[in-house]
Amino acid sequence: MLVSNCLGRDVELTIALPPAAAVAEIFPVLYLNDGQDFERLHLEATLNALYARQAIRPFVLVAPHANELRTQEYGTAAHADFNGRGSLAGAYTRFMLEELLPFAQAHFQASANPEEAVMAGFSLGGLSAFDIAWHHPEALTRAGVFSGSFWWRQKAVGAGYTPADRIMHGLVRAGQLHPSHRFWLQTGTLDERNDRNENGVIDSVEDCLDLIEALLDKGLDAQRALRYVQLEGGHHHQHTWGHIMPDFLLWAFGRPEAAAALPAPLPVVRLQLDPALAPTIVPADAPPIVMPVPLVLPTESAPEVQPGTRIADLFTSSSPLAMSTTRPVEGDFLPYAGNYINLVPDGTDPVEALRTQPQQIHAVFAGLSETQTEQAYAPGKWTLKEMLLHQIDTERIFSYRALRFARADSQNLLGFEQDDYVAHSGANARTLASLLAEYDAVRAATVALAESFTEEQLNRRGTANNGPATVRALLFITAGHELHHLNIIRERYLPILHG
């Protein structure tokens, strides 16, 4: 635990030291955002496997945990986004530079050499890592970004947005490339489904490619200082990021012979990934790309290793593993709730569904005016603002029930009348931006709570609205309830509003 004056909170840390047999006065260091996901990324198994193969140099891993303020602490220090997210990114940058780096250097033999320090992160945490490395090469010059949130923008889509409103792209164009800058960037072809300009390339891939172009315009050597890995079938999920983690670690800390054996990244292309339709970032006179070779990945559990090669210390207990996809069964919920549960596809982790649904919600509301969101699709029906606030209210209630039951509280929790709630919500008097901000805050709290549940807690049950409900069922119901309303919006509202 590190007490942070910059953030005004205690920051939990996961710290992994090199194998006990490693001998060095000072070690290279990786600062990894979202340290609470250490176990979900299967990082211990990955590190053990790479050390056992002697594929990487010994290094120190320092991973600060995010909390409920994640969407405020991560981002770009210079600018919050159009919705006010990232308001504490400047404070987080100061925490990294003024508190965490000196702490790691003083207590864990972490190198103070900027070229031996790497910062990495996932999604919004990846944007944060890139922003800090780009602006502070005096502290660290290398960054790894997994599915980075390079969409981070000053205006909402549909509210006058243009590609020039992407904040990190503008910061790169306005900034200076450092001679020692090195970047590892990754996207998954299934990171999302959004395609703002309808050119056949999902936004997460396009935003990353556009950032690469901005880096090249600043003089970055694509052959020497850039590795872009586009993972076919890769999702915006810890499973994908854990799967590609060996590639990143070999890039960052690989011994020369192991790093040389890395699979070649795919060509950087646009338009359905067809190289014939667009140029790559690799210059025409560059050496040909070698054919990929298989990358040995670790198994789900740590393999057998030689004595003395295991990680010496892990100074925290990290967050639980991803929730199993076991579905609730009859008797775990009231019959009406089965309609919601059935909307969640088989094999889906409901927590991951909850984590990714906000992208769909924001995409649905992007481009709609305040007037449009105050319209109903038929007399007596809710407006879109009322429906959105209904989803927020219902999610709060379902989460409250899940909390009570997870804590073995078996009291019967009363139901609620949704129409009365909507009638007294005042949703139409609020701005859409305020409703979306509240939705994001509630969803972040729901996901944080869901991720805390153990398997035993997921199976606990209680009584709500005079019927049974398990914690597991409530998570499926919450995800399915949102899918239900997304279907209604797309089928009944949008055809009228866009007609």
Image (spheres, rainbow, N blue to C red):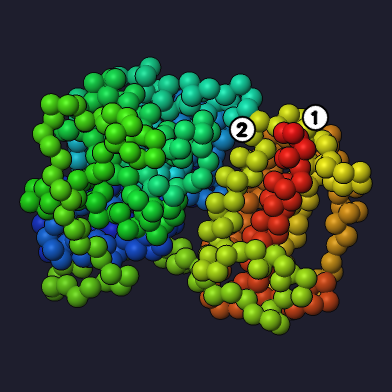
Q: Is residue 407 left or right of residue 254?
A: right
Amino acid marked by disc 1 = Thr
- Name the quadrant containing residue 226: top left
Residue at 22% in and 65% down? 48
Residue 229, percent from left and from top: 29, 44
- C-beta proximity under 8 Å, tags 1 and 2: no
The residue under the point 65% across, 71% down is 473
Locate the N terminus by quadrant: bottom left
Which numbered disc flags the more N-terminal residue, 1 or 2?
2
Residue 11 visible at all: no
The residue at the far left in this view is: 257
Nearer to the camera, 452 or 224: 224
Give the mark toward the camera: 1 or 2: 1
Mark 1, Cα crowd under 10 Å, few <14 / some 14-19 / many 20+, is few
Q: Which residue corresponds to the image point at 53% horizontal and 22% vertical from the top-left?
A: 162
- Quarter where residue 173 is shown: top left
Q: Is residue 156 left or right of residue 336?
A: left
Q: Is residue 175 visible?
A: yes
Q: What amino acid is at disc 2?
A: Asn
Answer above or below: position of 167 versus 299: above
Where is residue 80? Give x, y as percent: 54, 29
Image quarter of the C terminus: top right
- Report the disc number at residue 83: 2
Q: Is residue 58 above or below residue 100?
A: below
Q: Residue furthest front?
A: 276
Q: Residue at x 32, y 26 (%)?
A: 213
Circle on res. 371: 1
Q: Tag 2: Cα neighbours inside 10 Å, few (<14), some, or many (≥20)?
A: some
Left or right of 403? Residue 145 is left
Residue 54: x and y in percent read 12, 60
Location of residue 134 in the rendering, given as x and y in whole percent from the top left corner: 33, 29
